[in-house]
Image: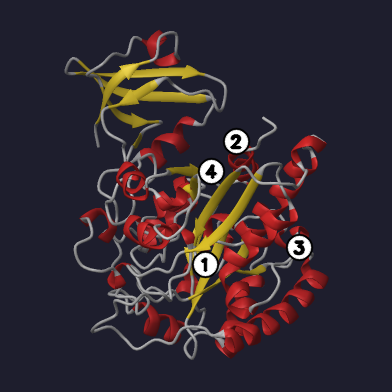
């Protein structure tokens, strides 16, 4: 494949070679470049040969460089092409549970191992054939993030209903033998892949440690828009507690035998069960925090640490001159309110308000899926100087909620400032401190 050069960085290797805009890269070290993964992997060498089409003439460049030194080339495309989409019909697919009228981009079901490598997206590998699996190994594409769900292939097929019949354990063993590491997840559906199936999944995957680095255990997410879809059961307090009990017994054995807890239930599982969020050490290196594993504990720890460093004048109680509201999902509300109550800020009263999700259904309790209209509906009844929200409610890099309401529209409707706050405990404390009378 040809990859057309858009620009060349001044003073870079490519510039020294005389490459310019409009030239086309054909091969690196004699191999055609399928995509960005190929380009990155092949260019991480000390000795390189580039085949480039310059003004219609193919020219070979051979040179040496530092192993990780970039060439300084920007291409016209992202060198990935069309995102590889999911070929499954998962019984628990969240996209299938979206209400009507949502923008098309939210309905894209990506299942692209390249995005798993580059961005940490979870993939099923059901659209990865043997040749592509070999390319993953050849390019040392590691670590990947893989949705296993069940190592029992019959159960997995029942959940995913794939168009293809690739055996996940055969794929994972091949990756492991090739030195590829991966993080795994199982979205647990009560009555289907919990119980003995989950126990076997933990056992099978932990046998691959340290190629399989960790396993996230996530409760199935069910919205109020499941018309025509399979009848799946959500977790309740009792079933979540039972699962955590079993997993914790497994973790004790794994810690003793392998030196790692390995299996990590998501925050939501603890919240459903009404169990305390584990301590900081139980998340080890927080490897699956972007999968909702340890977010709450990390927020609490960061807030505690940042509060400890504050000057005493900021920690006094007394009469509140400013009244803040933090709007959040129903599951995290009690934890955040306790956090605020235990860490008073001079001159600021903080009320944490749980926002019921009318858009997706009240079974959806996380903050990141709150829409602009639901925020307005809940916060209209509150009197405060400002409303703090997590930036996760907004589209990345923009000021738009999932229902396409803008931040400015929500501010206008509420008549107060609505402040998006970063994801860290330090970010939250800084946002509260901004209203202190001691500033």
Query: How far apart are the alpha carbons under marks 4 and 3?
Result: 22 Å
Label 4 neighbourhood size at 10 Å, few (<14), some (14-19), many (20+)? some
Q: Earlier in the sequence, mark 1 or mark 3?
A: 1
Q: Quadrant of the N terminus?
A: top left
> In this figure, which residue is indicated by the disc labeled 1?
172
* Element on which disc 3 rests: loop
Query: How far apart are the alpha carbons under marks 4 and 2?
Result: 14 Å
Given contact means CB atoms under 8 Å apart, are the residues at marks 4 and 3 in contact?
Answer: no
Q: Quadrant of residue 184?
A: bottom right
Q: Earlier in the sequence, mark 4 or mark 1?
A: 1
> In this figure, which residue is indicated by the disc labeled 4?
422
Q: Quadrant of residue 224?
A: bottom left
Q: Earlier in the sequence, mark 2 or mark 1?
A: 1
In the image, 227 versus 349, the foreground residue is 349
Given contact means CB atoms under 8 Å apart, are the residues at marks 4 and 2 in contact?
Answer: no
Q: Nearer the viewer, mark 4 or mark 2?
A: 2
Point 38% across, 85% down: residue: 158
> In this figure, which residue is indicated by the disc labeled 2?
434
Q: Quadrant of residue 205?
A: bottom right
The location of residue 362, given as percent across then percent down, is 41, 75
Point 40% across, 60% down: residue: 370
Point 74% across, 38% down: residue: 314
Q: Earlier in the sequence, mark 4 or mark 2?
A: 4
The location of residue 377, given as percent across then percent down, is 36, 62
Query: How far apart are the alpha carbons under marks 2 and 1?
Result: 49 Å
Query: How far apart are the alpha carbons under marks 3 and 2?
Result: 29 Å
Point 44% across, 35% down: residue: 40
> In this figure, which residue is indicated by the disc labeled 3?
279
Specify whether residue 179 is in view: no
Q: Earlier in the sequence, mark 3 or mark 2?
A: 3
């Amino acid at each position: 494949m040809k990859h057309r050069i858009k620009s060349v960085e001044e003073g870079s290797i490519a510039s020294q070679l005389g490459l310019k805009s409009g030239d086309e890269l054909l091969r690196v070290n004699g191999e055609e470049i399928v995509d960005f993964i190929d380009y990155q992997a092949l260019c991480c060498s000390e000795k390189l040969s580039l085949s480039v089409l310059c003004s219609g003439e193919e020219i070979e460049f051979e040179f040496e460089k530092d192993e990780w030194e970039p060439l300084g080339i920007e291409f016209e495309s992202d060198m990935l092409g069309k995102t590889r989409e999911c070929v499954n019909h998962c019984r628990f697919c969240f996209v299938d549970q979206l209400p009507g009228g949502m923008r098309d981009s939210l309905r894209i079901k990506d299942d692209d191992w390249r995005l798993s490598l580059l961005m940490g997206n979870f993939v099923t590998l059901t659209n990865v054939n043997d040749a592509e699996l070999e390319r993953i190994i050849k390019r040392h594409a590691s670590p990947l993030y893989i949705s296993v769900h069940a190592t029992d292939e019959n159960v997995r097929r029942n959940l995913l209903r794939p168009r293809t019949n690739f055996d996940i354990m055969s794929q994972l063993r091949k990756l492991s033998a090739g030195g590829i590491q991966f993080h795994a997840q199982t979205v647990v559906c009560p009555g289907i892949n919990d119980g003995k199936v989950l126990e076997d999944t933990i056992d099978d995957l932990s046998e691959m440690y340290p190629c399989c680095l960790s396993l996230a255990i996530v409760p199935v997410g069910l919205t109020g828009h499941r018309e025509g879809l399979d009848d799946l059961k959500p977790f309740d307090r009792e079933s979540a507690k039972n699962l955590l009990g079993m997993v914790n017994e497994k973790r004790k054995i794994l810690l003793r035998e392998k030196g790692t807890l390995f299996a990590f239930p998501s925050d939501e599982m603890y919240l459903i069960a009404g169990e305390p969020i584990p301590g900081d050490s139980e998340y080890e290196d927080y490897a699956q925090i972007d999968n909702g594993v340890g977010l709450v504990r990390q927020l609490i720890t960061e807030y505690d640490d940042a509060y400890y460093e504050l000057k005493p004048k900021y920690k006094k109680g007394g009469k509140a001159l400013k009244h803040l509201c933090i709007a959040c999902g129903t599951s995290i509300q009690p934890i955040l309110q306790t956090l605020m109550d235990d860490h008073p800020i001079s001159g600021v009263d903080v009320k944490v308000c749980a926002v019921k999700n009318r858009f997706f259904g009240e079974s959806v309790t996380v903050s990141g899926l709150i829409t602009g209209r639901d925020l307005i509906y809940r916060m209209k009844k509150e009197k405060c100087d400002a409303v703090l929200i997590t930036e996760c409610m907004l589209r990345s890099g923009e000021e738009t909620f999932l229902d396409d309401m803008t931040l400015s529209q929500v501010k206008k409707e509420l008549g107060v400032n609505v402040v998006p706050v970063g994801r860290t405990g330090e970010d939250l404390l800084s946002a509260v401190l901004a209203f202190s009378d001691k500033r």
